[in-house]
Image: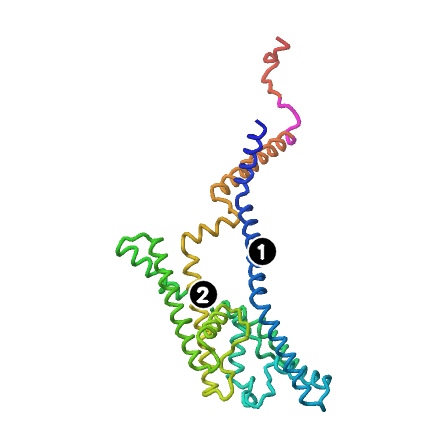
Amino acid sequence: MLQSLASNSCVRLIQTHKSTWYFVSLVLGYVLYLVFGAVVFSSVELPYEDLLRQELRTIKKQFLQENDCLSEERLERFLKKALEASNYGVSILNNASANWNWDFTSALFFASTVLSTTGYGHTAPLSDGGKAFCIIYSVIGIPFTLLFLTAVVQRIMVFSTRRPITYIHTRWGLSKPLVAIVHATLLAMLAVSCFFLIPAAIFSALEENWNFLESFYFCFISLSTIGLGDYVPGEAANQKFRQLYKVGITVYLILGLIVMLVVLETFCELQQLKQLRKMFYLKKEKPQDRLAILEHDHLSFTTVSNRAAAQNEDKTQPFVSVQTLSSPNDDPMIQ
């Protein structure tokens, strides 16, 4: 008996706080996914890092043996200075000296990566004035970019998603959720083809040291605004039409980001995903419940007001009204 009561109470507790339990499971799933990613990345990349460290130590030792006049301390200072400059996008190599990081097209590319929060990190402001302006420029520009992208996506969604789905639904009488799923799938395939596969093939042809996988990797990292910065196009030595190439990449990033947002918004409007999201959200008060609460409050307020008015009337009439007598004979006492 006690076990059945306990099980019934647990079931009622879970049902009444269902969204809370779903949210807790969502948080735990996210933490486990983070741990899973860390384990996979560590197991895959750690051996390559160790191999690279050993290779660098061997090259450094061999270089010092071949150059006895150079001490290890002087070499360390030189390499430290060169690496600091490389972090700011400045290289001491002869084949990279012709590329400037802050000409107009490179600065335009940098501004687009800042406003889109991609931030490759291969180029950074050198001066204090540039760093201060970057902060102010980002504080104003990032919300401005969000407003711009939201307005553009809202207008594109009307012609790319809502009208086609409504037209097919009314024209052929197909189920609207089914039409929405098929439309979202086709739109995603078209976006992947036009903004991932084709650009990856183009980048692998234009960039000498990139294969197709590395080019596809750059497209995904860029359009998802991750922006690791390990692959940046147009940075090779003696790049042909480098300025025009940088402008084209800037246009590609902006258009690709808009298309990605359109695809994500299209999937977010699917009924199945809406129901899935509602599982983790707090339930809103229904209009009927709000109306009942308002009516209850109104009745309570009206009752209190009537009682207060009645009390005020009693206070304004302290004496009991006596019937006026027209003659002494009307008094019952005399009679």
Type of residue at label 1? Val
Task: Write down the quadrant of residue 71 in the picture.
Answer: bottom right
Looking at the image, is mark 2 or mark 1 earlier in the sequence? 1
Judge left or right: residue 75 versus residue 33. right
Q: Nearer the viewer, residue 143 or 292?
A: 143
Q: Which residues are magenta?
A: 315-321
39 falls in the magenta region: no
| Closest to the observer, 236 or 154 | 236
Task: Name the residue type under label 2.
Answer: Leu
148 lies left or right of 314: left
Most frequent secondary structure within the magenta stretch: loop
Picture coordinates of residue 335, whole percent (x, y):
61, 8
Element at badge 1? helix
Of 51 and 187, nearer the camera is 51
Q: Kindly identify the residue that appears in the image at 54 percent across and 86 percent down.
A: 103
Mark 2 or mark 1, which is nearer to you?
A: 1
Structural distance between the alpha carbons of marks 2 and 1: 26 Å
Does residue 89 appear to the left or right of 250 in the view shown? right
Residue at 42% over, 59% down: 267
Is 318 covered by the magenta stretch?
A: yes
Residue 44: image location, x then y, percent? 56, 66
Residue 201's disc is: none
State the colouring used for the structure image.
Answer: rainbow
Question: Which residue in the structure is indicated by mark 2?
Answer: 261
Q: Report x, y in % for residue 140.
A: 56, 71
Which residue is label 1 attached to?
Answer: 31
Q: Residue furthest top?
A: 335
Q: Is residue 100 above or below residue 24?
A: below
Q: In front: 73, or 334?
A: 73
Instruction: Sort mark 1 into few (<14), some (14-19) or many (20+) by Cα contacts within 10 Å.
Output: few
**Residue drawn at the location 43% of the way across and 66% of the way down:** 153
Q: Position of residue 61 (x, y in %)?
A: 67, 82
